[in-house]
Structure formats: C-alpha cells, structure tokens
Image (spheres, rainbow, N blue to C red):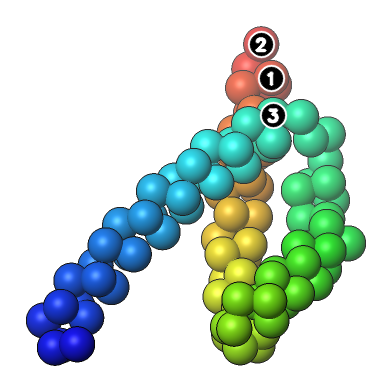
Amino acid sequence: MKIKKIRHEIDLIDTEIVKLLSRRSSLVSEASKNKKSIDAVRDPQRVETIIKSVRQKAVKTGLDPQIAETIYRNIIDCFIIQEIVEFNGMIIEYQDI
C-alpha cells in the first residue's frame, strides 16, 4: 500500500475516533448529572475496571495492551476534568438558586 493510501485510511479512522470520543463526551456529561460528589467523579475503582477491560480487548485485537492503557488513561483523565468542570458548574448553579 502506498503512503498516500495509508494516510487516507488513517484519516478515515481518525474521523471515526473523533466521532466516538464526541459520543463518549456526551455520555460523560449525562453521567456527571447523576453524581453527588467529586469523589464519585474521580472514582479510581471505575478507572481501574475500565483499564483492565481495555487491556483485555487490546490483547484480543492484537493491540499492545500498554499502548491501549496509556491512551485510555489519557482519555479518562480528560473526561474526568470535563466532569469536574460540569459538576462544579452544577454546584454553582444550585447555589445561585
């Protein structure tokens, strides 16, 4: 396969990844509405459950599990920040009432 075709295929995959991340972001926003504390947002046990699952899926699909874990820890960290911002915004809104 020529480099131009490879790059095109990568671009198509990136488009799908961004769509999926956007969908995940919407679900994270929805989940943040149901959380009662920052501890519930951070939830280290849930993070480790996700990481374990992602590593298993990576092995099954032929992806290096360490690569999958590193990517997912970054994704999770970004979405935790999103949830904290949204959670704090909800607290501020409730205090204004």
Does the residue at mark 1 contact the one at mark 2 (Cβ under 8 Å)? yes
The tag on residue 94 is 1
- Residue located at (65% from left, 47% from top): 84
Q: Tag 3: residue type?
A: Lys
SS of the residue at dot 1? helix
Nearer the N terminus, badge 1 or badge 3? 3
* 16 is higher (above) or lower (below) than 92: below
Compared with 13, 88 (above or below) is: above
Q: In which quadrant is the N terminus drawn?
A: bottom left
Residue 4: percent from left, percent from top: 11, 81
Label 3 CA crowd tier, 10 Å (few <14, some 14–19, many 20+)? few
Please, what is the three-letter code of the amino acid marked with disc 2? Ile
Q: Is residue 69 visible?
A: no
- Mark 1 burial class by Cα count in 10 Å: few <14, some 14-19, many 20+: few
Q: Nearer the viewer, mark 1 or mark 3?
A: 3
Confirm or deny contact between disc 1 and disc 3 (CB under 8 A). Answer: no
